[in-house]
Image (cartoon, grey):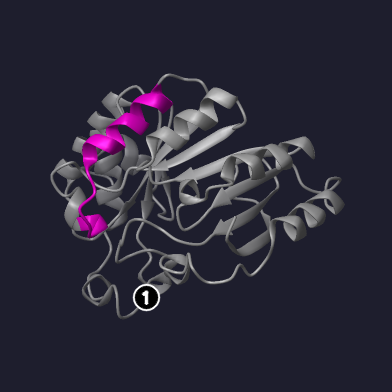
């Protein structure tokens, strides 16, 4: 594992659990809005922390933490991801994987081993806009394979979309249709302050969608998923129920 860093205590990255977050280096996408842009293209850089160091630290923290989130970058690019997760679980931790869904064969292997407790998959864009959002020649058909694997229900999961200022309500409905049947679909607010000023210059100049827009988006997604929730945006409950409420 090429590990770029660790967040030692998080209350928000694993639902209902106190978790450490381990960040791997390297990603096969090039999203301009990425909040972890410092990890995207450094897979050849020396690891900041070795696997042994991380595992030794986790062993000392077993009484205080419930779970470990493996994030990135894109963790499924790591050749020893499976072994790392097995060793983390051997310490008694729950394990959550954050993934962009572009490596369904790796995801399938992890599910077959039954070594994941939770998966959060980024549903980054609608099929029509996917290539322009991830800024590479990635195939949405590959992503569909990962979606299908998670919809089999072998592990608790969520799909989540960072809602860019350029997204339309039709985009959100299109994504919701792709993850139809999911137990949880999360719409999270784009935060320009966390992006690279050079990579995301155009997006940083655009105002994010307002609360009422998110309420409308949640209503558009709701028919296709069991639950659609919002993160990073304060929407009055009345707005969710009544389009005329602000």
Q: Is residue 117 magenta?
A: no
Tell me the quarter of the image containing the N terminus.
bottom right
Q: Position of residue 213 (x, y in %)?
A: 24, 50
Q: Which residues are magenta?
A: 133-151
Q: Position of residue 130 (x, y in %)?
A: 20, 49
Closer-to-camera residue (47/240): 47
Closer-to-camera residue (74/222): 74
Specify whether residue 70 is in view.
yes
Specify whether residue 226 is in view.
no
Q: Residue at x 83, y 52 (%)?
A: 61
Q: Is residue 229 above or below residue 58?
A: above
Residue picked out by circle 1: 196
Q: Residue at x 31, y 62 (%)?
A: 30
Closer-to-camera residue (11/134): 134
Q: Position of residue 222 (x, y in %)?
A: 30, 29
Question: Crowding at label 1, few (<14), some or many (≥20) Cα neighbours within 10 Å?
Answer: some
Q: Is residue 137 magenta?
A: yes
Q: In the picture, residue 187 is in which quadrant?
A: top left
Is 83 left or right of 224, judged from the image as shown? right
Q: In the picture, residue 4 is in which quadrant?
A: bottom right
Which residue in the rendered view is the most extreme toward the bottom?
A: 198
Q: Is residue 244 above or below residue 8?
A: above
Q: Position of residue 47 (x, y in %)?
A: 61, 67
Q: In the picture, residue 32 is in which quadrant?
A: bottom left
Q: How many labels were placed on the picture?
A: 1
Q: Residue at x 38, y 35 (%)?
A: 104
């Amino acid at each position: 594992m090429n590990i770029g860093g660790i967040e030692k205590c998080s209350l928000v990255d694993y639902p209902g659990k106190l978790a450490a977050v381990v960040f791997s280096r390297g990603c096969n996408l090039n999203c301009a809005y990425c909040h972890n842009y410092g990890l995207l293209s450094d897979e050849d850089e020396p690891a900041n922390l070795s696997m042994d160091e991380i595992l030794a630290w986790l062993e000392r923290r077993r009484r205080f933490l419930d779970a470990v989130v493996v994030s990135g970058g894109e963790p499924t690019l790591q050749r020893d991801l499976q072994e790392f997760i097995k060793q983390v679980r051997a310490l008694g931790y729950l394990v959550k994987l954050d993934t962009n869904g572009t490596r369904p064969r790796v995801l399938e292997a992890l599910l077959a081993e039954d070594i994941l407790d939770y998966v959060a998959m980024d549903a980054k864009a609608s099929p029509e806009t996917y290539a322009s959002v991830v800024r590479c020649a990635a195939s949405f058909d590959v992503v569909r394979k990962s979606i299908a694997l998670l919809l089999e229900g072998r592990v608790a999961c969520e799909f989540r979309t960072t809602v860019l200022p350029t997204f339309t309500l039709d985009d959100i409905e299109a994504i919701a249709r792709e993850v139809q049947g999911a137990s949880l679909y999360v719409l999270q607010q784009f935060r320009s302050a966390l992006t690279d000023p050079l990579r995301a210059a155009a997006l940083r100049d655009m105002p994010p969608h307002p609360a009422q827009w998110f309420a409308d988006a949640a209503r558009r997604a709701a028919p296709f998923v069991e639950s659609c929730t919002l993160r990073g945006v304060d929407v009055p409950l009345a707005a969710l129920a009544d389009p005329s409420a602000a």
